[in-house]
Amino acid sequence: MTAVIDKAALEEAAREPRFWEAPPRPVWEEEPSKAGVAGKGIVLAGACLAVLFPLWIVVVTSLSSKQTITEAGGLVLIPKGITFVAYQELLSGGQVTRAAIVSVCVTLVGTAFSMTVSVLAAYGLSRSGSLGHRWLLMTLLATMFFGAGLIPTYLLVQSLGLTDTYLALILPSAVSVFNILVLRGFFMNLSSELVDSARIDGAGDWRILWQIVMPLSRAVIAVITLFYAVGYWSAWFNASIYLSDQSMMPLQNVMIQLVQKQEAPVGVSQAIKTGQISALAIQMAVMVMALLPVAVISPFVQKHFKKGMLTGAVKG
Amino acid sequence: MANSTVPRSRAEAETTETASRAADATGERPEKRKLSGKLSLRLRFRRDRTLILMTLPAVALVLVFNYIPILGNVVAFQEYDPYVSDNGFVAMLESPWVGVEQFQRIFADSAFWDAVRNTLVLFGLQLVLFFPIPIVLALLINSVIRPRIRAVSQAILYLPHFFSWVLVITVFQQIFGGAGIIAQTLRQHGYEGFDLMTDPGIFKFLVTSEGVWKDAGWGIIVFLAALASVSPDLYEAASMDGAGRWRRMWHVTLPALRPVIALLLVLRVGDALTVGFEQILLQRDAVGPGAAEVLDTYVWWNGVRNQDFSYAAAAGLIKGLVSVALVLAANKVAHFMGEQGVYKK
């Protein structure tokens, strides 16, 4: 029996939907109404615009010349004549350059330290039959329910002699119990056969962690690293109470002075006074410097968020 | 977890075997037996010492920076004098005891009660205006079936969560502030300008909307995960029974979200006295303490700024104790409602 096979139609049915096409609906689901689709589109587009529009203004204004900014009467909506003077001025030495370097170094060192401690603790607690497991876990968990309070912590950091050192920006908030729990939850869900067979082959715990558990947990490790890094990058409060030396301040604290208190940064003020650069462009450029690393890195880690967050966090 | 079912040493293997034989004899369910119970402490320590060693740095950090300061709360019952000694600990030992005098001062201070009121009002606003938004957004995104649109809009909505509070407030200032883009455009067209950032009357709404901008998108994640775990069979069955899209949402989707909503609500209530310390501290000077002071900033102002350590520590202690009580109470309520809560019973 020979049937006429329409090859084109078969291929048409078998191919993956193009990205603008909707994937097939289940048969029982009714087609959405035009108004429903339009309504959904408007709300979603509105929400996305509410996020993107302010960022667009900030970036465009930081790239505009003084003349464009004056003509636009403040913040620029449509770029005209892109220039990088503001960034050149900020990064050619002086307060902002130093603050950026401080922020980058504190973030790198702090994240590396926090991750080392957290991964070790999470692995150490990932076998529920081990000696002292319950006690150690309880010691960590209890801190999620109560804090010691601002004043006693301040007095402790002062007594330890950490004030006016960069350690004060790292040590007091180095471990997050929540992050350890997420890591631990992920480690516990790894196939135990793998770990056991490695142990039979003679691998110790250090080796198992480094060569088996870590490579299998790249997703969650990426997510937690991002959390720690964002924490260090965004922190300003510890610096504001533990550091008194202006030249040690990280970028966020300099941004407070610059934008909220409307002070010109040391080293750049001359250029603003003589009218070469708009003070607004300088402020916006500092803001871009603060948001850029986060905005660039987080989308790459994003695909792991759901997996990384939920395996551990919700189960606790 | 499952590791403990596999014997890790010869001694344990033997114990396991005898244990299982004994279990067979008594007819006890084998998974109920305790594997490690028969191992001597010394043996268990030798087996697990690497694991314990790995945990120690984190435990040490938590002990130093979370537990030792709890002892420091004794300054709340003192008249702490920071000038007695350069070292805070020595100063603590030498400061005179005053009993509950600090607490009496606090309860007599109207600024403290203002801070309490502001904290509770802000908490209420956040609960009503912030809490439902991620749920609605998650339902919306979940109903979009084009994968590209879903991915892109999620990526955009998550983004502000990773910005620092300094940045978020600065962005708001540049848009809604007195020198911001909206006020300037209005002035250019002959209208009167305005400054939302320094207006005490709307400060609480401003703080709430900043929170929505920063974290509403991030809040979607947990709801989306809950939605993804709903079996499509349920929808199909409901549809076969004649349920339209709204009835499916009401009878299938929302019940699936119920445990997550309950859990987050419990967490939020337990955290009621903490309403955005950094965020409010950054804007406190612009609107004045009358509208902006919350309990956390009250402690900061009296302790760090005015160096009245004992008074601030006492205020912080009150807040901490009430918070712990709230967490425990909220968790009790969760258990009562049949949800798991933050920790298990």
Image (cartoon, coloured by chain):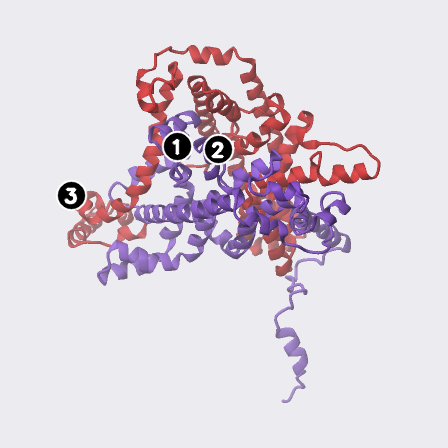
Chain colours: A purple, B red
Q: Would you say the residues marked 3 and 1 are in contact, meaning their CB atoms lie under 8 Å apart?
A: no
Query: Residue at position x 46%, y 44% from top?
Result: A102
Whole-number angstrom distance, CA of label 3 to CA of label 2:
48 Å
**What is the x, y in percent for residue A182?**
42, 47
Identify the subunit bearing mark 3. Answer: B
Give the mark toward the camera: 3 or 2. 2
Residue type beneath disc 3: Arg
**Co-location on one chain, circles 1 and 2:** yes
Q: Chain letter of disc 2?
A: A
The mark nearer the N terminus, 1 or 2, is 1
Q: CA distance from mark 3 to mark 1?
A: 42 Å
The residue at 57%/56% (across/down) is: B233
Mark drawn on residue A163: 1
B110, A194: nearer the viewer: B110
Calculate the distance from the C-alpha at mark 1 to the C-alpha at mark 2.
11 Å
Among the 4 quarters of the image, the one containing residue A168: top left
Q: Is residue A111 above or below residue A166?
A: below
Q: Amino acid at mark 1?
A: Thr
Q: Amino acid at mark 2?
A: Ser
Residue A134: quarter of image = top left
| Marker count (numbered) | 3
Residue at 24% x, 56% y: name it: A204
Left or right: B307 with respect to B64? right
Q: Which residue is mark 3?
A: B42
Q: Label 1 crowding class (10 Å Cα cut-off): few <14, some 14-19, many 20+?
A: some
* Front-most of residues B35 and B82: B82
Residue B164 located left or right of residue A223: right
Spot occupied by residue A220 in the image (x, y as percentages of width and height)? 43, 53
* Label 1: element kind: loop
